[in-house]
Image (spheres, rainbow, N blue to C red):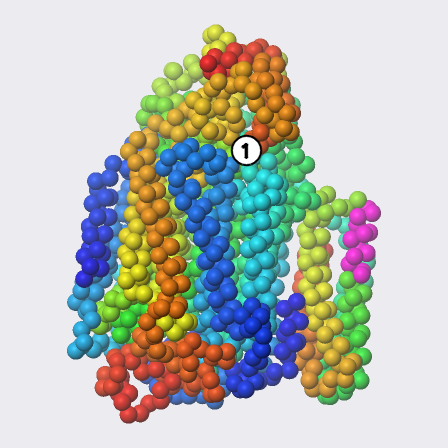
């Protein structure tokens, strides 16, 4: 009888947990309320089946518990009952599938007037591109990627000259209009994931994928990676900022175009060297691997880094001074600290940027 | 009895008390074994073909030139199959001498085919078509390699049957071996023709 | 290679079931009897023990992962790299090297010949080789822990490009060893699997028609067919990825700039790999689930003393599920970037599978209805299975319905779902089966007290682990994360309370994991000190309980093979003396009649 009670308690407990748990969908910030509705329908249908079948099972176990003087019934099958159950199940399945497919139909159908933005993934940082005044992206090729052309744009494509290239820290979007997010990756699979907008899609090297949504709530949202992409996967972060059109336009103005980048102008924001360095550390994705609080990471923490004596992979030891740090940023796999894998991409920075980053690193080291 | 009527019998009434004389379906077990195994091999080459077709649609695909030697190899493989078929029919008629000759010819020709395939690889290599030069090359090497491995496995079985025959085993005793070898050869010939056709068409 | 042995046995025109007891080869040496044995029962035990040993390792890995999730950074050797290596090895071992090997190599070997009334598998020698190749596969897999860089950390899905690029641990040695090990596994399994299929087709005893076979055999048979057709996809994709890795081909590799370096690959498609992988990966789910279905049907019928309800529909459901499992694979790829219009097709086929699956659940429950239910340990596990399977099956409807999968994919909802449906459920079925058949294997009953303790702690514990986990997933917590808090702290939607859930889950996991020691001790203890069981302690109808000796000797049935006169589920037949009639009892006095 314990079993019957436990089964009933588990059913009741599960239902109560569902209604009382504080852990549920994050407040939605996009037009995909329909996804939540489909989820609710599915919860109702499945919850009903879960409760009824399990309670019926518990009742059967109670009613037909072993008694010496009784024999079980002999009933090889009952076609009528089986047909009814099949029909009933089919109806339930259709009730869940039909709305799901209708919403999926909307999901794959991108509105014509959707604004374009491109998210580019690489181990383990994000960067973003806007099509600029002409509203058309220039063509890209991973083969074009170099220090002076980190986005891999085709330099001969006129459509690309006015493309706006944003650093990795933030992607800004205006509220209210549909956005088509095109996605590409320079190295491995990634997945652009913001729980509040519900929609997401993998980034696949060698092809361009996409999804769309309409931002409906002003605010800042964490961007995460949802497809295992290697050591720093869990920390591949960025921020998505949803704001009024005017604010968005103002922010957009501060982003350099591809033409500017080729000409070597623009790119650095104002502020003290330390502030600039902090911005760079975010844009370049340094913090995906290097923690600031001494916590374990894919690479050594920056806390207390300067002045430390570290043992290298080859057994020799090195004093972490400015010279070593500068070398390790530009040519990171020359002298790797023991216990870490040689997987840091060489940073491609101008001298000014390197100075700013060093300033920030020293202040973060404390 | 068709599979559907089998599956719709009600075992608690229709067959109550019934007992048959036979075990299972009463077919030669080795033949059933081979059929199932051929199903598995079909899955391997079927999936490769599917992957081939998908990969072919991408931009960087460049067709591989077909070396003339492949035509000769194909002819050799066909002859090999024919020889084994001859051995198979002869085994049914208990003509030990012909079985011996057929088996030997079949095996030798299959071996010649493998050597021929290896020469094709060398030829392509000397022309600069390495396994990583283009996906069409990669697939060619992969498919011919896997096909060759399967044929090599067949040759091991062929060797065992032949040895037994030479040691003086009765034709009757190795009839099944010869038959299975022949079936396996025909199957690998079919696989090869499909794969070769794939190469020619694309 | 397989063909070699075909010809080896080729002179046997007669099906091997006709083999006389006197002709069964009995090895004289200890080594031949217990190590290089060709007896399916010994091979079954070898498979089971190896699988459980490597499964224990995977269990330890999962506890280490849970510790990191509950108390991030508390154990210094769990680095971000080590964590994803644990994730990968845990998944791969559990799915392939434990469950597949245990259900097919273990239960398949033990039960197929016995339940069908055969002396042994049709090709005992191939069967033996199959195990040794499996062992080699396991050893190669374990070796990857000791090579430079350690085992691969690419997730059990082994997706390229990351699997073979330096940003993922084990991208040099680990992934290569994994592919080699899988290759061995597939070859070894194919040799065993051919045996199981041909034995079912050919070696059934007199009167054992297809529709008189126990559902366990139907399920293992279908699962084996699926495995034979699905594993080639894994083999092919592993070979192609290894070529990409070692010879620089571009099957799956597009142009890539990896950690600042341009690679030589170009034009390949990572999605092609995913299609091949899941063409194997989805049937794999049913390779594990179907044998569990079969075993549970057996257990429920025997211990409820009632025929399985709707036997024919159960058989049809197994076959239909098996067939459909080959056209649903891309439901694992809804957000992979494949053509989004595929979503319509695969969502529909996936939800169609819900119908035969639901029918199986109804029929189990309806078998209990009007039964005479003995709540012994195997039955407890069987009911535990049905309960968790209902839960796991229903959450599958969420993920199969393409649009709902979009927010839930790659979150802990997925982790909770697949553990519920293909980890918790099958392992409960395994435990139930072990408690059920242990008396036949050893001649002694497993200790009931320890068994009940094991059941309660495991069943309730596992539910406490995985039920709350769904809600972490709905909240949005991504899977395969070393830590939720990165350098910038927790995501802003991640409440502190959710971390408490993680702690709770970890505590439950540690308890459940340690309780398994009781089970292992019970296996050891009862082998010599358990209550003697006799030949048929449960009063079951199927042939394995009707052997002359318990444990059955090599050759299974003594001098003469049994003949089968009835289906496998004649329980509580009206008018019969006993509440069960074994399959080998002819119609006559005392057997009543049912219709």
Given the current orientation, which residue lies at the most extreme bottom position? C589
Residue that numbered label 1 is attached to: A185
Helix, strand or loop: magenta stretch: helix
Left or right of C556? Residue C493 is left
- Measured from the top left, where is residue C238 in percent x and y? 59, 51
- Measured from the top left, where is residue A83 in percent x and y? 28, 68
Q: Can you say whether A300 is above or below C119 in the image?
A: above
On whether residue A162 falls in the magenta region, the answer is no
What residue is drawn where x is 18% and y is 57%? A5
Left or right of B93? Residue C567 is left
Tell me if residue A225 can be seen: no
- Measured from the top left, where is residue C87 in percent x and y? 47, 44
On whether residue B116 falls in the magenta region, the answer is yes
The image quadrant of residue C570 is: bottom left
Q: Nearer the viewer, residue B20 or C86?
A: C86
Q: Which residues are magenta?
A: B115-127
Element type at mark 1: strand
The image quadrant of residue A50 is: bottom left
- Measured from the top left, where is residue C285 in percent x and y? 44, 56
What residue is drawn where x is 50% and y is 63%? C47
Q: Nearer the viewer, residue C137 or C395?
A: C137
Pointer 1 chain: A
Q: Can you say whether C230 is above or below A75 in the image?
A: above
């Amino acid at each position: 009888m314990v079993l019957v009670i436990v089964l009933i308690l588990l059913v009741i407990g599960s239902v109560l947990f569902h209604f009382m748990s504080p852990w549920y969908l994050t407040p939605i910030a996009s037009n995909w309320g329909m996804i939540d509705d489909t989820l609710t329908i599915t919860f109702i249908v499945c919850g009903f089946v879960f409760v009824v079948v399990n309670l019926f099972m518990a009742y059967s176990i109670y009613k037909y518990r072993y008694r010496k003087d009784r024999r079980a019934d002999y009933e090889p099958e009952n076609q009528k009952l089986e047909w009814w159950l099949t029909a009933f199940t089919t109806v339930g399945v259709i009730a869940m599938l039909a709305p799901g497919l209708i919403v999926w139909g909307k999901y794959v159908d991108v509105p014509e007037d959707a604004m374009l933005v491109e998210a580019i993934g690489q181990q383990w940082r994000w960067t973003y591109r806007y099509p600029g005044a002409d509203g058309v992206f220039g063509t890209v090729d991973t083969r074009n990627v170099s220090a002076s052309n980190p986005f891999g744009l085709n330099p001969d494509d006129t459509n690309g000259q006015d493309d706006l290239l944003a650093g990795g820290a933030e992607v800004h979007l205006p509220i209210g209009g549909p956005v088509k997010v095109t996605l590409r990756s320079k190295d491995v699979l990634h997945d652009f994931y913001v729980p509040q907008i519900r929609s997401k899609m993998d980034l696949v090297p060698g092809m361009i994928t996409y999804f769309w949504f309409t931002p409906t709530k002003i605010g800042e949202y964490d961007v995460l990676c949802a497809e295992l992409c290697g050591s720093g996967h869990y920390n591949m972060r960025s921020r998505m900022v949803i704001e009024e059109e005017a604010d968005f336009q103002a922010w957009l103005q501060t982003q350099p175009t591809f033409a500017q980048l080729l000409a070597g102008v623009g790119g650095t924001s104002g502020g003290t060297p330390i502030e600039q360095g902090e911005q760079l550390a975010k844009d370049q994705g340094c913090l995906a691997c290097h923690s600031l609080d001494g916590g374990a990471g894919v690479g050594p923490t920056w806390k207390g880094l300067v002045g430390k004596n570290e043992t290298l992979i080859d057994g020799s030891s090195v004093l972490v001074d400015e010279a070593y740090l500068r070398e390790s940023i530009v040519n990171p796999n020359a002298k790797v600290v023991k216990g870490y894998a040689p997987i840091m991409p060489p940073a491609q920075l101008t001298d000014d940027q390197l100075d700013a980053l060093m300033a920030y690193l020293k202040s973060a080291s404390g | 009895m068709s599979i559907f009527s089998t599956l719709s019998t009600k075992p608690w009434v229709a067959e109550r008390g019934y007992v048959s004389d036979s075990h299972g379906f009463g077919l030669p077990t080795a033949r059933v074994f081979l059929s199932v195994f051929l199903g598995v091999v079909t899955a391997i080459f079927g999936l490769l073909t599917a992957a081939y077709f998908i990969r072919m649609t991408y931009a960087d695909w460049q067709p591989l030139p077909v070396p003339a030697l492949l035509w000769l190899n194909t002819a050799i493989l066909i002859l090999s199959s024919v020889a084994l078929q001859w051995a198979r029919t002869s085994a049914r008629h208990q003509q030990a001498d012909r079985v011996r000759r057929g088996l030997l010819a079949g095996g030798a020709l299959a071996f010649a085919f493998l050597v021929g395939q290896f020469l094709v690889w060398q030829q392509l290599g000397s022309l600069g078509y390495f396994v990583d030069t283009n996906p069409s090359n990669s697939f060619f090497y992969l498919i011919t390699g896997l096909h060759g491995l399967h044929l090599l496995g067949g040759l091991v079985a062929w060797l065992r049957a032949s040895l037994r025959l030479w040691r003086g085993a009765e034709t009757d005793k190795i009839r099944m071996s010869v038959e299975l070898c022949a079936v396996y050869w025909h199957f690998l010939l079919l696989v090869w023709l499909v794969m070769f056709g794939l190469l020619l068409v694309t | 290679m397989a063909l070699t042995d075909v010809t080896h046995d080729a002179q046997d025109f007669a099906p091997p079931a006709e083999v006389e007891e006197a002709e069964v080869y009995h090895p004289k040496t200890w080594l031949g009897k217990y190590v290089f044995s060709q007896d399916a029962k010994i091979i079954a035990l070898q498979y089971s023990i190896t699988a459980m040993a490597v499964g224990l390792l995977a269990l330890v890995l999962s506890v280490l992962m849970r510790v990191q999730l509950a108390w991030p950074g508390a154990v210094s050797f769990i680095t971000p790299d080590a964590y994803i290596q644990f994730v990968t090895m845990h998944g791969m071992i559990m799915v392939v090297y434990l469950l597949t090997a245990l259900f097919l190599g273990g239960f398949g070997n033990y039960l197929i010949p016995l339940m069908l009334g055969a002396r042994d598998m049709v090709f005992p020698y191939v069967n033996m080789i199959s195990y040794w190749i499996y062992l080699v596969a396991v050893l190669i897999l374990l070796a990857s822990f000791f090579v430079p860089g350690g085992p691969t950390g690419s997730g059990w899905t082994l997706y390229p490009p990351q699997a073979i690029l330096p940003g993922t641990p084990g991208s040099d040695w680990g992934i290569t060893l994994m592919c080699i090990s899988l290759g061995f596994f597939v070859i070894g399994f194919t040799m065993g699997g051919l045996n199981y299929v041909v034995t079912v087709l050919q070696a059934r005893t007199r009167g054992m028609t297809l529709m008189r076979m126990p559902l366990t055999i139907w399920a293992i048979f279908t699962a084996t067919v699926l495995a034979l057709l699905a594993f080639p996809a894994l083999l092919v994709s592993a070979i192609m990825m290894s070529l990409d890795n070692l010879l620089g081909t571009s099957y799956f590799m597009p142009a890539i700039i990896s950690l600042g370096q341009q690679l030589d690959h170009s034009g390949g498609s990572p999605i092609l790999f995913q299609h091949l992988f899941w063409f194997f990966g989805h049937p794999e789910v049913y390779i594990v689930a179907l044998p569990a279905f079969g075993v549970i049907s057996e257990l429920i019928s025997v211990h409820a003393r009632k025929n399985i309800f709707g036997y024919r529909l159960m058989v049809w459901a197994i076959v239909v599920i098996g067939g459909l499992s080959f056209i649903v694979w891309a439901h694992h790829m809804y957000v992979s970037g494949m053509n989004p219009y595929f979503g319509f097709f695969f969502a529909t086929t996936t939800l169609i599978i819900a119908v035969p699956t639901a029918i199986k659940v109804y029929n189990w429950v309806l078998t209990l209805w009007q039964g005479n239910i003995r709540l012994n340990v195997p039955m407890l596990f069987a009911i535990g299975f049905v309960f968790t399977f209902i839960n796991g099956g229903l959450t599958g409807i969420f993920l199969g319905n393409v649009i709902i999968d979009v927010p839930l994919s790659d979150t802990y909802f997925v982790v909770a779902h697949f553990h519920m449906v293909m980890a918790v459920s099958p392992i409960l079925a395994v435990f139930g089966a072990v408690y059920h058949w242990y008396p036949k294997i050893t001649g002694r009953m497993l200790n009931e007290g320890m068994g009940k303790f094991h059941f309660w702690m495991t069943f309730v514990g596992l539910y406490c682990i995985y039920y709350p986990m769904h809600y972490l997933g709905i909240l949005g917590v991504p899977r395969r994360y070393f830590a939720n808090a990165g350098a910038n702290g927790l995501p802003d939607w991640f409440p502190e309370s959710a971390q408490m859930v993680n702690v709770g889950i970890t505590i439950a996991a540690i308890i459940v994991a340690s309780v398994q020691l009781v089970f292992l001790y019970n296996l050891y203890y009862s082998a010599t000190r358990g209550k003697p069981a006799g030949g048929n302690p449960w009063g079951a109808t199927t042939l394995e309980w009707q052997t002359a000796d318990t444990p059955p000797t090599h050759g299974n049935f003594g001098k003469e093979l049994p003949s089968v006169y009835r289906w496998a589920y004649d329980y509580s037949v009206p008018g019969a003396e006993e509440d069960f009639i074994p399959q080998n009892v002819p119609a006559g006095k005392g057997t009543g009649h049912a219709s």
